[in-house]
């Protein structure tokens, strides 16, 4: 699956010889990931090509004469597409050449040296657990350290992830993004301009039936049990009065298994809830609260007269979606570490045999896009397990697996071209049964 890399801005900097070079600000999921020069990326591409050969996406060529403005913009777009496409191959994502370069540029960008450090990890029940790490440890490595400390079975690591989580008013939690395996949690936390933010451990699957895969590991059950309680208390999951009474009784008994079994019947259990945002449905400017999971997008819309309307979009009705930056950045020379001022996510869905667009304006557009991808990936894996004649290749819970598939519809990814006022970060098509290259 393509990752949400983008290069919305670049800056001209003087070099030691009196000339100038271009420094590209690379963003991942809307947060500044690193700043790099073309020459650094060019050397990295050469290293990757020596390992992986010609399967890499095309890299923008060198220019030996001064670039015009249009040439510079074209190179920036080409570098952006290169970063998006080079992350499609999971083997490349896990290679030393890939990871070591990205570790180095993250540290260099924020002037952080590799050393021992303590990092607080927010657990699902709200408690913090301190772990000893290196500032250069990736999210994958930190997750291994955390799992070892709490006794989580190593083979179940793919069902969990590390997230940047922000504390909002009244103690409510807001999940800002999932950290990619190659991100450095210590650096991401220190470099983020988000207030009251912590690195948190949460389950990372949106199909509630996958709870059953974890029931033989006591530590895993504890984690999803704690998260279920937190989600119910925080209003992410919405039990009926009768369900709530039964859940409270099971909680008093300490019966985690029965509690989780009943929780799976609760509305929005296992879903990720986004912060309140605005949408254009049924008319522009309506407030909206989204819950994403269980193969659907559930939206509670507040109408102009303060009435509420619940709309559910099954993923089977969603054809594609795209994330767009609206407007241009004003602070070109300042820190400008977040790009959440004007983010739009729109998805196309089927309504009475017609395709329509649903538009959302939310700072969590990239998180929502990641959740949509996750639901598609889980659906693919489930269909493949049910049909041995399918042949697809998916990254399932951290491992690359092959399946066989026969499908009548092929899907693809598309990235809208950058314009002077609208910068598109990512688009995905997910209608039918997607192939891996369609993600």
Image (cartoon, rainbow, N blue to C red):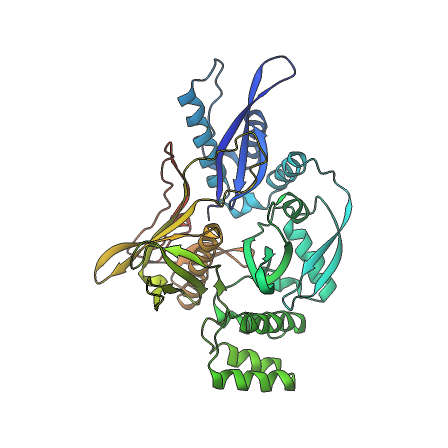
State the image coordinates of residue 191 (x, y, percent, origin top left).
Answer: 64, 43
State the image coordinates of residue 334 (x, y, percent, origin top left).
Answer: 58, 32
State the image coordinates of residue 149 (x, y, percent, origin top left).
Answer: 74, 63
Q: Residue lying farthest left?
A: 353
What's the residue at 45%, 17% (across, down)? 67
For this rendering, which residue is in front, 376 or 247? 247
Q: How many marks?
A: 0
For this rendering, which residue is in front, 198 or 148? 198
Q: Is residue 141 left or right of residue 289?
A: right
Q: Taking 68 as reference, is 153 above or below it? A: below
Q: Quadrant of residue 31?
A: top right
Q: Taking 176 as reference, is 218 above or below it? A: below
Evaluate whether residue 54 shows in this view.
no
For this rendering, which residue is in front, 299 or 228? 299
State the image coordinates of residue 295 (x, y, percent, origin top left).
Answer: 41, 65
What's the residue at 55%, 78% (across, down)? 260
What's the residue at 57%, 61% (across, down)? 169
For this rendering, which residue is in front, 307 or 437? 307
Q: Taking 391 as reference, is 31 above or below it? A: above
Q: Residue lying farthest front?
A: 305
Q: Is residue 192 left or right of residue 267?
A: right
Q: Quadrant of residue 245?
A: bottom right
Evaluate whether residue 321 shows in this view.
yes
């Amino acid at each position: 699956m393509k990752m949400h890399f983008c290069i919305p801005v670049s800056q001209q900097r003087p070099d030691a010889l009196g000339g100038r070079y271009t420094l590209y600000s690379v963003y991942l999921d809307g947060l500044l990931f690193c700043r790099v020069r073309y020459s650094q990326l060019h050397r990295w591409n050469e290293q990757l090509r020596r390992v992986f050969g010609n399967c890499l996406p095309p890299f923008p060529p060198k220019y030996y004469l001064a670039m015009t403005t249009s040439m510079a913009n074209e190179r920036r777009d080409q570098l952006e597409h290169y970063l998006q496409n080079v992350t499609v191959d999971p083997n490349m994502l896990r290679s030393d050449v890939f990871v070591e370069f990205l570790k180095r540029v993250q540290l260099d960008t924020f002037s952080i040296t590799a050393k021992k450090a303590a990092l607080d990890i927010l657990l699902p029940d709200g408690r913090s657990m301190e772990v000893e790490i290196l500032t250069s440890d990736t999210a994958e490595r930190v997750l291994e350290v955390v799992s070892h400390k709490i006794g989580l079975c190593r083979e179940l690591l793919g069902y969990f992830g590390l997230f940047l989580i922000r504390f909002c008013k009244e103690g409510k939690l807001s999940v800002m993004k999932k950290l990619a395996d190659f991100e450095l949690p210590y650096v991401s936390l220190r470099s983020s301009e988000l207030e009251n933010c912590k690195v948190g451990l949460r389950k990372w699957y949106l199909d509630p039936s996958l709870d059953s895969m974890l029931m033989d590991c006591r530590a895993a059950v504890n984690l999803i049990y704690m998260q279920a309680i937190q989600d119910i208390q925080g209003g992410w999951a919405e039990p009926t009065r009768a369900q709530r009474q039964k859940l409270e009784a099971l909680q008093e008994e300490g019966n985690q298994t029965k509690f989780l079994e009943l929780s799976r019947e609760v509305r929005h259990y296992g879903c990720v809830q986004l912060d309140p945002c605005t949408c254009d449905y049924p008319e522009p400017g309506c407030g909206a609260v989204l819950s994403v999971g269980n193969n659907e997008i559930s939206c509670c819309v507040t109408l102009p007269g303060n009435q509420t309307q619940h709309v559910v979009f099954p993923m089977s009705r969603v054809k594609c979606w795209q994330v767009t930056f609206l407007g241009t950045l004003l602070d070109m020379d300042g820190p400008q570490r977040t790009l959440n001022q004007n983010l739009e996510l729109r998805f196309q869905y089927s309504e009475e045999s017609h395709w329509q667009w649903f538009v959302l304006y939310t700072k969590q557009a990239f998180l929502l896009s990641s959740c949509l991808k996750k639901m598609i990936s889980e659906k693919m894996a489930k269909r493949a397990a049910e049909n041995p004649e399918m042949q697809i290749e998916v990254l399932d819970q951290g491992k690359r697996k092959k399946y066989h598939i026969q499908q009548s519809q092929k899907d693809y990814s598309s990235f809208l071209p950058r314009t002077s006022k609208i910068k598109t970060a990512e688009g995905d098509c997910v209608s039918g049964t997607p192939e891996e290259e369609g993600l």
